[in-house]
Image (cartoon, rainbow, N blue to C red):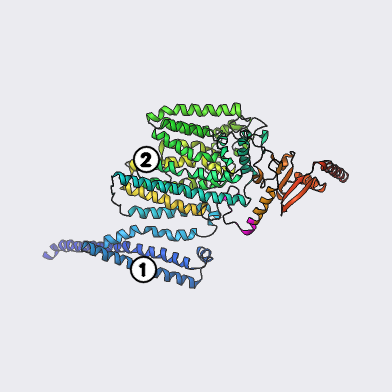
Amino acid sequence: MPHAMSEPGIVRRSFARAASAVRWTGSRLAVLGSAVDLTIWPAVYAVAIGVSLWLISQKDGILKSYLANKVPHEGRLQTAMWVGGSFLAILLIYFAVVVIDRWRKGRFDNRAVFERLNTWLRGLLALPIVMVLAQVGVEKSDPLWTMFLATLAGVLIAASAYSWPLSEKRRFDSPRAETIRRLMTGLLLVGLWAGYGYLLTRLAISHHHALNTRTADLGYYDNIFYQSLHGRPLGCSFVKGGNHASAHFDPILVLLSPLYLIYDHAETLLTLQSVWLGAGVIPIYLIAKRKLESRSAGLTLAFVYTMYPALHGTNLYEFHSLTLITPLVLWAVYFLEEGHIKRYAVTILLLLLCREDVPLMVCFIGAYAFISGDKKLRRVAIPTIVVAFLYFVVVKVFVMPGSGMMNEGSKQAYSYQYYFRDMIPQRKGITGLGLTLLSNPMFVLRKTLGNPQKILYLLQLFVPLALFPLVAKRARVMMVYGLLVAMLASRKPVFQIHFQYAAMVFPFAFAITPRGMQRLRDSDRLSALGIDSRRFMRACLIFMLVGTAIISWKFGALVDNTSFRGGFMRLARPPLSQGTQKRWQHIKKMVDRIPPGARVAVTGRTGPQVSNRQHVYFLRQRKRADYVFVDERQIKKKTKKLHDRRKQSKELIELDRYRTYALFRVDPSKRAATKKLASKAKKAAKKKA
């Protein structure tokens, strides 16, 4: 009986011992798990560093084999040795930091030291990603994958930066200290502006001297500058009606034409465009400094602007009046939000003069002012919209021959309906576009977000800005027009960063990025997630700086890559090859043989070299010419037959030649002989028939 009574006590004691054993095992496993968690990161970092160092130490071709997992066995062993050496080096670093921490605090706190180092060093994980991106051609063969890797590298480095300790703000409130800060900031901004202007001008002129620019469009604008300076505003002998209004109405070119007096060649336009765009660093800095209350934030955004691939593409696709809106948009937004109404009005006026469709973008600036919630901004909203819209109507009805929204409606105008041919199958202009949007939304969705090239375009525009334009709330309305044009277009240049059309979006994106950052910083969302707002803003700025640098490396103009183009042509970088320089020098000698007042017929690549005159035409226009300066590869079949007859009859007397580039003087007295040859050719063709 006593034995039976003792059984429950034995059971309870057994359960208690088992529970104690489980708790002990759990605590030991927790300690082990914590130890593994603390030590696994150094091993991961060692792999990242070791693999990267091994790849750097190898020949250029090894990366392709490594990515295909075809490295020989000896190479794998070498990689393992590099990883092992990196692991030992990291352990030494951790040990040194532990010892220093012990010396400073007087006690060991290994766990805290390891945790700090593990978070601080996570940016090292970006090393192998950067090595993969170093593969030549990856940006062209797989651009979306390249964008993903660049973004991931930026996120890893930004996450590491988030954990870095915040430096204490040091206040130097003396007037002298403030003056020094302003002076240093001003020098940095001027240096950025000058550096950008110099580098991009050099690239643009090298590209031009490599004969990679075309009559359409550099030759057009060069001729417009010449004609405007000589009393024919917006005159252009290459286009219908002899005036650029048949294609675009951009009177700002008339205001800028006196600059042509400095040097009356296309190089002046290329220099003007680079310097003009570089000036955007000033308003970007001012907007960011005002919104984020930080000089460093303003300077960071200014740096990002100079590295921005879409800006490079816009800059290096010859010359365009649309490109000129970039700094003006930034100034307009800055003056609007600062309440400088007179300066805002002047800037809006200059914007309206840039191109006939810019007033539609200005209407969206007015729309933002109206919905912003700020009474001061709302006062200028309606005047902005009314003036912009009326200007658009007046230009379309009374100035341009094509009165339609897409410049359709006249044979004397160049219609842009073909830009949206998928959306306007019956070529019914804006009406046809609206009908497609309303009647076939799934088709529209497939042609917009279902197009990988358009997704890439959006990523290239917004990832360098950490997607902040998309969270700028009401300010996002300013991007609507440019995004609609890009997403609805069928013509590829409209949604690629290598052309002027990107200027319809990215200046607005830059202008509202600080607002998006401010909105997120001041909201309760970060604190609700346990995120420190100051650290987060710093991490975002570092992401923009690092992410844009990597994206610019693979898609921008500052570093040679396989993706970037100056419009349709691969960018020719300085120094040009000896053969290219020799060709350019020969072309210059040909051009020098043509008298300034002579009439000249040209083809696509030769036009920008002689467009600084009143009478210059395409060869296909068949206008009376004194000289013919052509690249004979570009003469189309029908025109080529006539060209060959003119040479045969001696109507074209060859003066000089460099391979397919040739200069001819026209002998009008031989025109009858050319007609005889043409008549004989027709008779011969009839006999064959």
Residue depicted at 54% across the width and 55% down the height: 561
Q: Which mark is residue 290?
A: 2
Q: CA distance from mark 2 to mark 1?
A: 45 Å
Instruction: Say whether residue 144 is visible.
Output: yes
Instruction: Say whether residue 455 is visible.
Output: no
- In the picture provided, is 421 more to the left or to the right than 687? left
Q: Which mark is residue 89?
A: 1
Helix, strand or loop under label 1:
helix
Residue 83, located in which quarter of the rendered image?
bottom left
| Residue 672 % position (x, y) | 84, 41
In reply to whether residue 564 is colored magenta, the answer given is yes
Instruction: Work out whether 364 lies above or below 655.
Output: above
Residue depicted at 61% across the width and 51% down the height: 209
| Residue 414 % position (x, y) | 64, 35
Helix, strand or loop under label 2:
helix
Residue 683, located in which quarter of the rendered image?
top right
- In the picture provided, is 112 more to the left or to the right than 441? left
Give the camera-side residue of 495 and 392: 392
Residue 670, located in which quarter of the rendered image?
top right
Question: Which stretch did the figure color magenta?
Answer: 563-581
